Image: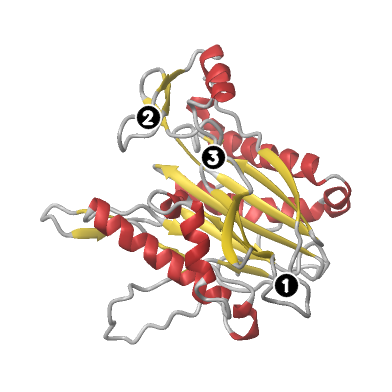
Amino acid sequence: EGSPPAPDPSPEAAEGPVRDRLSFQYAATELPSPRPSPRGAKEAPVGGALAETLGNATRHGIAPGPDGRSLAKINQDRGVVHYPFNGSCNEALLCVFDGHGGSGEKVAEFCMRAIPELLQQNGLELRASPSEQLSHTVCEADRAVLAHRGGEFARMCGCTSIIVYMQGATVWTACSGDSRAVLGYVRDGAIRARDLSVDCKPDSPEEYERIVGAGGVVSGASGASPARVWADGRVGLAMSRSIGDGECKRFGVIPDPEVKRFDLGAAPANEPEADGDRFIIVASDGVWEFIDSQEACEIVASAPASAAEGCAKLVHEAAARWKQEEGNYRDDITA
């Protein structure tokens, strides 16, 4: 009934830092509601000095119950940071996997465990050819998911994938779906945003052509409803690329990520307030539904001394926007 086994799975993988060939894993931690808690819950996804440079947080979604009150949903998001990574303090990996469908959280859980491990198993190849290795690994994870339980496990469910691989001052992003990576930088004293990935939408020209050519149907975005891929008129998937979703794979949905490369330029060490790149946000669409990239960077930048605080502020603000716009419904939110 569970997800397919990840390569050499660690039982502690989702519960804190795990050492593996000089690789520490930090999984996103569920944030409590900002409302006062009788148990005095504390926000501490990442502690100590690490909180200055790393934040990771998630909040489960909610849905209206039979009496109209909101009920908690299973959190199908998974977010993880590996640093150091691949046996090097000069490398890092940041990932978000947003599950959907009946067992989407199991697909996302598998990807959170398997993809970093597969990348490290081919660590030399990753350093030499990051674009090729990232794409190969995502597709390998997709094949494993689709083969599990004779193809039934992920026939009607799947997950998005956004991966950020950092090697020194160079960054590669690999995007399958609508989770997103954004660079926050300063120019002329003001915080700016630059998208490091492009949401894989079914109605974008190249994606539309591929899906229709495979016999799929694409309905355009209308109001609050996004564009969707329809497989046999039954499955309406709001993205053109994903891991899993076996039914939609027959109609032009693919796992292959769009891979992009960027060079970072931080402010000089002796002029920390000067123009330069400041941080990278990696988040599920629970953030991006009501907050655009520029505003997200402004929220994170409002906590310059703590990435953990900036991350928590972004997740809480996203939750507040869902309440404002949708009332007692909220998608899972991870950053």
Q: Return the disc, 2 or 1, that comes first in the chain's sequence.
A: 1
Q: Residue furthest front?
A: 188
Residue at disc 1, secondary structure: loop
Give x and y (percent) for residue 294: 50, 55
Which residue occupies the foreground of this view, 264 or 203?
264
- Which mark is first along the chain, 1 or 3? 1
Q: Residue at x 75, y 58 (%)?
A: 264
Point out the frontmost of discs 2 and 1.
2
Q: Secondary structure at mark 3?
A: loop
**Residue annotated with mark 1:** 19
Res. 176 image quadrant:
top right
Would you name the residue on which mark 2 appears?
221
Q: Is residue 21 shown above or below 272?
A: above
As shown in the figure, which amino acid type bears the numbered disc 1?
Arg
Residue 39: x and y in percent read 31, 86
Which residue is the site of mark 3?
199
Q: What is the C-alpha distance between the residues marked 2 and 1?
A: 44 Å
Kindly report the distance in space between the C-alpha atoms of the residues bearing marks 2 and 3.
Answer: 14 Å
- Tell me which corner region of the image, top left, top right, bottom left or bottom right, holds residue 93: bottom right
Q: Is residue 314 visible?
A: yes
Mark 2 lies on a secondary structure that is loop
Q: Specify few, some or many for label 2: CA neighbours under 10 Å numbering under 14, 14-19, or 20 or more.
A: some
Which x, y percent locates residue 4?
58, 46
Circle nearer the N terminus (2, 3): 3
Q: As rendered, which of 277 and 163 lies closer to the eye?
A: 277
* Closer to the eye: label 3 or 1: 3
Number of other residues with Cα within 10 Å of mark 3, as a class: few under 14, some 14 to 19, many 20 or more = many
**Which colour assignment does the render follow?**
secondary structure
